[in-house]
């Protein structure tokens, strides 16, 4: 499990939500979490303060192996960036890499990962057999794109609606 | 140093909604405390985004390092990690206790629905903000197909996409 989070640390460019799809694939296919447990973990992770990836790592670790699991998972998630800081800064300085262009290229990579995350989340939603979820998704999506409402308000609002709906 | 710790601790404890929600808050605080100018902050932000790992963690590490060297980096990053860590511990023990409650179930399902919407929204923004050309369209389509067929080789595909995307970016400016 630690290795999964270590790997995740390497590829979680552009925020934790990107890596959720990969995380799900790894956790569920290795039998570490059931699908519903995973959905529970990401739902909680996005509502608590702090980076989403860190929250998932802590939650999953704590649920499976207690406090030690929580600490180890979180530590291994942030180990890759710590290793990378020096190497990457060195490379960025020496090779004359255009940072804006690199960032654009990374965003292309992030798009790949997030497409996978999106498909993966939709798949779990379909498996749960509760199609009302997608109505909430559509409405949140529209709010997210077209209004300036804080995303956390959208999430909390949806959660409260969920209490009445499900 | 204590101020540095407290500042990052407070930002992390009070900002819900992932790393990206924290960035404008960090920026405002640094400016208010006269610690760093926005331009310097944005340079660091670009680096933080180019590195793997949670953005909030990366940016606090880099800001801490710039202000107080290595100890500053460790202090700032540690301060950012502590609040979510304990919140999660508390939240998960609560959830484990009440997971069979219908209301809790409904609450989580609603939040899950919103999550799909948010991830879709970020995807939409990434598509809209990318400067597209024919190379990139081919690259991303091919990568997505391979990715779904063989998700166990994701890191090589990801690296290939980023490197070839970078080359495509370089070509674009040549024209």
Image: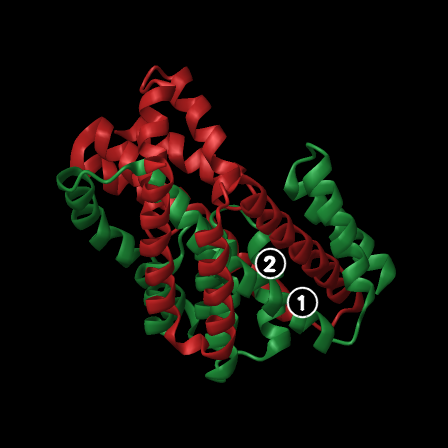
Judging from the image, mark 1 belongs to the subunit labelled: A
Residue B85 against residue B33 in the figure, above or below: below
Q: Does A125 sit above or below residue B85?
A: below
For residue A136, which quarter of the picture? bottom right
- Look at the image and tell me whether residue A64 can be seen: no
Q: Pointer 2: what residue?
A: A44
- Is B101 on the left or on the right of B71, as rendered? right
Q: Quadrant of the C terminus of chain B?
A: top left
Q: Label 1: which residue? A: A122
Q: Is residue B98 above or below residue B69?
A: below
Q: Callout 1: few (<14), some (14-19), or many (20+) C-alpha neighbours within 10 Å?
A: some
Viewer-nearest of discs 1 and 2 = 1
**Label 2 environment density (alpha carbons within 10 Å; few <14, some 14–19, many ≥20):** many
Q: Chain of mark 2?
A: A
In the image, what residue occupies the spot 22% across and 47% down? A85
Residue sitting nearer the eye, A99 or B15? A99
Chain letter, red? B
Q: Where in the figure is residue B2, as x and y percent of width and height?
A: 29, 30
Any mark on residue B138, and which? Answer: none
Instruction: Give x and y (percent) for residue B128.
Output: 58, 42
Q: The N terminus of chain B appears in which quarter of the rendering? A: top left
Residue A117: % across, % down: 55, 63
Residue A85 visible to the viewer: yes
Q: Which colour denotes chain A?
A: green
When the figure is inspected, residue A1 is found, relative to residue B48, above or below; the finding is: below
N-term mark: 1 or 2: 2
In this picture, residue B101 sits left or right of residue B158: right
Work out whether disc 1 and disc 2 sit on a shared chain: yes
- Which is nearer the eye, B103 or A143? A143
């Amino acid at each position: 499990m630690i290795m999964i989070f270590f790997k995740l640390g390497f590829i979680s460019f552009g925020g934790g939500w990107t890596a959720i799809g990969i995380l799900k694939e790894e956790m569920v296919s290795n039998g570490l979490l059931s699908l519903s447990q995973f959905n529970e973990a990401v739902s909680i992770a996005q509502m608590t303060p702090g980076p989403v990836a860190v929250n998932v790592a802590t939650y999953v670790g704590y649920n499976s192996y207690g406090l030690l699991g929580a600490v180890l998972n979180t530590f291994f998630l942030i180990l890759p960036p710590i290793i990378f800081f020096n190497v990457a800064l060195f490379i960025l300085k020496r090779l004359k890499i255009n940072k804006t262009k690199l960032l654009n290229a990374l965003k292309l990579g992030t798009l790949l990962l997030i497409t996978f995350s999106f498909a993966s989340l939709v798949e779990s939603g379909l498996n749960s057999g509760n199609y009302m979820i997608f109505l909430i998704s559509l409405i949140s999506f529209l709010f997210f794109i077209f209004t300036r409402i804080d995303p956390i308000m959208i999430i909390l609002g949806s959660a409260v609606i969920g209490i009445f709906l499900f | 140093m204590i101020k540095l710790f407290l500042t990052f601790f407070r930002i992390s404890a009070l900002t819900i909604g992932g790393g990206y929600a924290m960035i404008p808050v960090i920026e405002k605080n640094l400016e208010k405390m006269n610690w760093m100018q926005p331009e310097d902050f944005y340079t660091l932000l670009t680096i933080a985004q180019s590195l793997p790992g949670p953005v909030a963690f990366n940016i606090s590490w880099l800001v801490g390092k710039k202000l107080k060297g290595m100890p500053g980096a460790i202090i700032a990053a540690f301060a950012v990690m502590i609040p979510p860590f304990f919140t999660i511990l508390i939240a998960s023990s609560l959830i484990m206790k009440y997971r069979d409650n219908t209301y809790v179930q409904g609450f989580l399902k609603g939040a899950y629905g919103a999550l799909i919407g948010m991830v879709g929204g970020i995807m939409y923004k990434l598509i809209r903000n990318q400067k597209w050309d024919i190379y990139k369209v081919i690259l991303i389509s091919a990568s997505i197909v391979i990715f779904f067929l063989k998700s166990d080789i994701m890191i090589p595909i990801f690296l290939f996409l980023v490197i070839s995307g970078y080359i495509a970016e370089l070509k674009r400016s040549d024209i």
